[in-house]
Amino acid sequence: MTVELSTKFIEEIKRFDIIYCLISGGYHSTTAALLLWYYGFTNVKLVHNKTFLELKSSLDTMKKLLAITKFEYLETTPNLKKENVWDILRRSFLRIPEVREDIKNKKYDRSKFECCNKLKKFPAKKFYRKIRKVPDGEEIKSFIIISSICPYESRFRNMHLHELRQKDTFLRLHKKAGDIWFGYPFRDARSVKPFREYLFSKDFKEIKHSGCTACPIIIAFRMYDTAQYYLSSKAAVRAGLPCFQKTMEDFIDGN
């Protein structure tokens, strides 16, 4: 299976003046940006949601991507209000047991993790408001945001993209984001393998993880195979999480 942009997707996004492609330094978003460049799109702007918790491998991947495509690079940053990002992460980790119980009861609420709200969600909303606003005297330009989520990543994403398959489209008008068009080029993707192979063929290196260096959401959903890895990582040590290790171990043993 090869990675490519479908003819229909290309036709659907051609009508927009500006294409904002969200990038994280991961396999999916890097591939999306490279394919837009390969297919000859010149009206692309790459947007990275900076959290100050990125892995070096992700930052290196984005640096190489920019060198190849020469696309304009934009960056969103969180308003920390003089707060330490590691304190925010620490408080989020302390809510993992509570969220695990919510997951068991099918009441998962992502907003309970302060880190995701402050470092990603709020800056993204601010960016959406900014690009919707047209300065006086300037021409109104149409735009679309490219999201590289895939159906195999989670049940919610599969359901979200399945709706697009039923409607035979790769685009969705998001009301909550302020009536902004989003495009999903990998609506029908089935595994990460073709993305890895595509990037390796372009001399990109292995990407460990495109999210934050330590993510409580991942641990909450995949407790057994990730908890000890994160708690022994440099990021966990810096965030002061080893003091939380005994609580985590007891929680794992009890579940």
Image (spheres, rainbow, N blue to C red):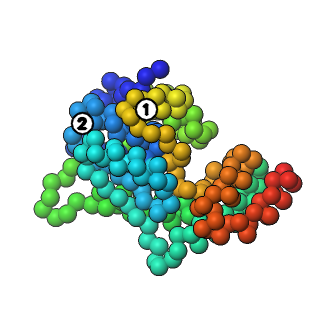
Q: Label for residue 58? A: none
Cα–Cα span, label 1 and label 2: 22 Å
Q: Is residue 29 above or below residue 242?
A: above
Residue 171 seen in this snapshot: no
Q: Position of residue 215 (x, y in %)?
A: 60, 56
Q: Is residue 137 left or right of residue 162?
A: left
Q: Position of residue 89 (x, y in %)?
A: 59, 66
Residue shown at 87% from the left, 54% from the top: 254
Residue at which label 2 appears: 41
Residue 42 seen in this snapshot: yes
Q: Secondary structure at mark 2?
A: loop
Q: Position of residue 194 (x, y in %)?
A: 48, 27
Q: Is residue 20 above or below residue 244?
A: above
Q: Position of residue 252 (x, y in %)?
A: 81, 53
Q: Is residue 119 left or right of residue 242?
A: left
Q: Amino acid at mark 2?
A: Phe
Are there few (<14), some (14-19), or many (20+) residues within 10 Å of tag 1? few
Residue shown at 40% from the left, 64% from the top: 77
Residue at which label 1 appears: 200
Q: Is residue 205 above or below residue 165?
A: below
Choose the circle earlier in sequence order: 1 or 2: 2
